[in-house]
Image (cartoon, coloured by chain):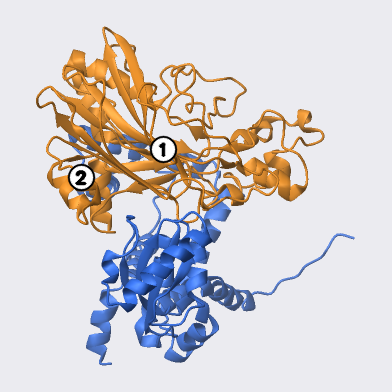
């Protein structure tokens, strides 16, 4: 794939949007310049800062704030800034469990996101697909036709079925045979799950055993009995990677995030010298 | 919840009613913390009204008030408020849901696993059976989890299975609630339906074309009752349907009223005097809890006219369809544990579904 095409594709990915936004925030946070001197008691609230407050507000409420809402945002900001500076002055940020955890969480986020841009190779994804066959397998599809019998017992259904088979042999139209019910007379290219949602588990279990392309029955469902004609229109199979690449990649990402965080941590850990003295 | 006055104690105004309707087009009628259709104190003549009611206020041992807490009364009050203000604040459709906190939806009685995780995640903490030392439980753990229900379900009649159509259907209240089973139910009303509409292959198309679906209003036309088309399908894996009912609610001279009609029975037809199906015995085997799949009806589909119709009456009509009795989750659980169910809990329940109402207005 050419670089240009790759970029175009990448720019459509929500994950890429997320990463770009995340990096932007990180860069903003990292390069705001020197910290405000906590000893200063002067607060400057410029146009850019107020626009940023308004934009944050809009992101939550999906509309621009009105004048009194902006004033409230400014009051809140000033209050937060004053408390922040006074807290720093008092050294309240030192040894604070919540702040430490927050900073750790930020680092963990950075550790995983630095590898988030990693594009897994085909081999990695193919391997993932092969080891999770069940999840990605495409089920067999069937055409199903059914004639409903509202009988109470199998014996009653059998005797009704006999006359229906006779009518079918004599060229009767299957659509005019049987009893009325608001179930589909026919389903086309349906997977087992779809058939089960309409006819129930017992029915699906039973039709797994029947010969194809011939009227068979009576078969019991949650609604009564049925004479059924079933044709497999496509066999179940494991899809090629290209068909399910998106799902496989997103599953791979989600499931390996922990692993990648550990890897990133290990690299940091390697740069440290650590001495541990356990109490006796 | 469904008061005649607003939060400040003033009578509900049309502005309040409009806001309420804009924000609350549907109401959750059945979930794990009980079913809120109605209460025996509010509906003393509804023999099926005492269903999975949970009256204890969360986090306390106090019993809540029936008045103002149940959906049928809210619908009745909505009509009263509308008569005064011109707007009905409680004109909602119905859904059921789980209210689960553990990312799983325990809708099946046979596989109930609680809703809050640690507090009710085990048979020993749900206490469907009496547990030794339970009188010493304090705080959240002392909640009577055994009175909670397996979850309900929200049903939606949407043209396509996509977000836009599902939301549109909820906005237009074309929804239904179930107490858990995948029963399907729908209701239409109109004046010009043909006699054979029920057996027509394009039933739904004709039903929409000649009337309104549930969740809608129908204007009074002439002096005779509109035709109500009610249809219900059983859960493909559940028990058969026992009876289908129409519930009519209205208000007269400041008094809320209701009437209940059985409109279809698993066996035979409702008695035209009492509007009830013949009594049916609960034959559930509570030791095995096996469901007799062939008892009860697979489908009920009927055209019905109100035998006591009054065109001057501003009323709502909704369908309630009841399954044959099946084991409650607590019975399944006690059987698995080889113990007996806590005294006072019903061994069986009649699962059900409710269509959203249709409001008939002049």
As drawn, the residue found furthest toward the right would be A280
Residue A143: x, y in percent? 34, 76
Mark in front: 1 vs 2: 1
- Residue located beneath label 1 in the image: B268
Dot 1 and dot 2 residues touching (CB under 8 Å): no
Q: Nearer the viewer, residue B290 or B180?
A: B290
Chain under disc 2:
A
Tell me the shade of chain B.
orange
Tell me the shade of chain A.
blue
Decide: few, some or many residues near mark 1? Use Cα within 10 Å; few <14, some 14-19, many ≥20: few
Q: Would you place residue B200 above or below residue A73 in this image?
A: below
Would you identify the image quadrant in which residue B11 lies? Answer: top left
- Residue located beneath label 2 in the image: A63
Residue A52: x, y in percent? 26, 50
User: For the C terminus of chain B, which image quadrant?
Assistant: top left
Relative side of A88 to B248, left or right: right
Would you identify the image quadrant in which residue A230 lies? Answer: bottom left
From where the camera sits, is residue B152 visible? yes
Question: Residue at position x 38%, y 60% from top?
Answer: A29
Q: Nearer the viewer, residue B107 or B320?
A: B320
Q: Which mark is residue B167?
A: none
User: For the N terminus of chain B, which image quadrant?
Assistant: top left
Q: Would you place residue B108 above or below residue A178 in this image?
A: above
């Amino acid at each position: 794939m050419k670089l240009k095409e790759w970029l175009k594709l990448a720019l459509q990915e929500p994950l890429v949007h997320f990463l770009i936004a995340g990096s932007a925030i990180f860069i903003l946070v990292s390069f705001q310049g020197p910290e405000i001197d906590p000893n200063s008691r002067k607060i400057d609230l410029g146009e850019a800062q107020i626009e940023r407050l308004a934009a944050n507000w809009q992101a939550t409420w999906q509309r621009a704030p009105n004048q009194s809402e902006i004033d409230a945002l400014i009051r809140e900001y000033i209050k937060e800034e004053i408390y922040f500076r006074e807290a720093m002055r008092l050294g309240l940020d030192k040894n604070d469990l919540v702040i430490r955890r927050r900073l750790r969480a930020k680092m963990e986020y950075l550790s995983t996101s630095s590898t988030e841009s990693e594009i897994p190779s085909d081999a990695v994804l193919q391997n993932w697909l092969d080891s999770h066959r069940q999840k990605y397998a495409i089920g067999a599809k069937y055409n199903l036709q059914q004639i409903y019998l509202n009988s109470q017992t199998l014996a009653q259904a059998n005797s009704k079925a006999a006359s229906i088979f006779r009518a079918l042999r004599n060229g009767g139209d299957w659509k005019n045979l049987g009893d009325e019910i608001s179930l589909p007379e026919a389903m086309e290219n349906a997977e087992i799950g779809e058939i089960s949602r309409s006819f129930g588990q017992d029915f699906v279990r039973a039709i797994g055993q029947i010969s194809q392309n011939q009227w068979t029955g009576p078969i019991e469902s949650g609604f009564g009995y049925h004479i059924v004609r079933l044709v497999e229109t496509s066999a179940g199979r494991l899809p090629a990677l290209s068909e399910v690449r998106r799902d496989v990649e997103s599953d791979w990402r989600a499931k390996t995030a922990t692993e990648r965080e550990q890897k990133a941590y290990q690299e940091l850990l390697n740069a440290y010298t650590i001495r541990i003295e356990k109490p006796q | 919840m469904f008061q005649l006055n607003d939060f400040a104690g003033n009578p509900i105004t049309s502005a309040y009613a409009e806001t309420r309707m804009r924000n609350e087009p549907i109401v959750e009628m059945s979930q794990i913390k009980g079913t809120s259709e109605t209460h025996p104190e509010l509906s003393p003549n509804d023999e099926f009204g005492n269903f999975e009611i949970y009256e204890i206020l969360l986090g306390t041992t106090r019993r809540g008030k029936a008045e103002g807490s149940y959906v049928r009364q809210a619908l009745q009050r909505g009509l009263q408020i509308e008569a005064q203000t011109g707007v009905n604040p409680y004109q909602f459709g119905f859904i059921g849901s789980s209210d689960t906190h553990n990312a799983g939806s325990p809708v099946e009685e046979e596989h109930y696993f609680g809703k809050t995780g640690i507090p009710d995640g085990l048979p020993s903490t749900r206490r469907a059976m009496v547990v030794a030392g339970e009188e010493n439980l304090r705080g959240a753990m002392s909640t009577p989890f055994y009175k909670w229900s397996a979850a309900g379900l929200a049903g939606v009649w949407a043209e396509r299975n996509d977000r836009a159509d599902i939301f549109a259907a909820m906005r237009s209240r074309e929804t239904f609630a179930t107490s858990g089973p995948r029963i399907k139910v729908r209701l239409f009303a109109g004046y010009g339906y043909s006699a054979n509409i029920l057996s027509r292959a394009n039933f739904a198309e004709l039903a929409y074309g000649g009337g309104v679906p549930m969740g809608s209003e129908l204007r009074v036309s002439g002096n005779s009752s509109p035709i109500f088309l009610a249809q219900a399908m059983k859960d493909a894996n559940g028990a058969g349907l026992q009876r289908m009912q129409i519930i009519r609610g209205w208000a007269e001279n400041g008094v809320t009223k209701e009437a209940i009609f059985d409109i279809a029975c698993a066996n035979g037809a409702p008695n035209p005097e009492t509007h009830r199906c013949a009594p049916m015995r609960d034959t559930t085997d509570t030791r095995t809890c096996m469901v007799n799949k062939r008892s009860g009806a697979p489908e009920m589909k009927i055209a019905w006219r109100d035998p006591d119709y009054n065109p001057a009456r501003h009323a709502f009509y909704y369908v309630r369809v009841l399954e044959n009795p099946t084991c409650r989750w607590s019975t399944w659980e006690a059987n698995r544990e080889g113990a007996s169910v806590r005294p006072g809990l019903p061994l069986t329940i009649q699962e059900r579904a409710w269509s959203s109402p249709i409001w008939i207005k002049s």
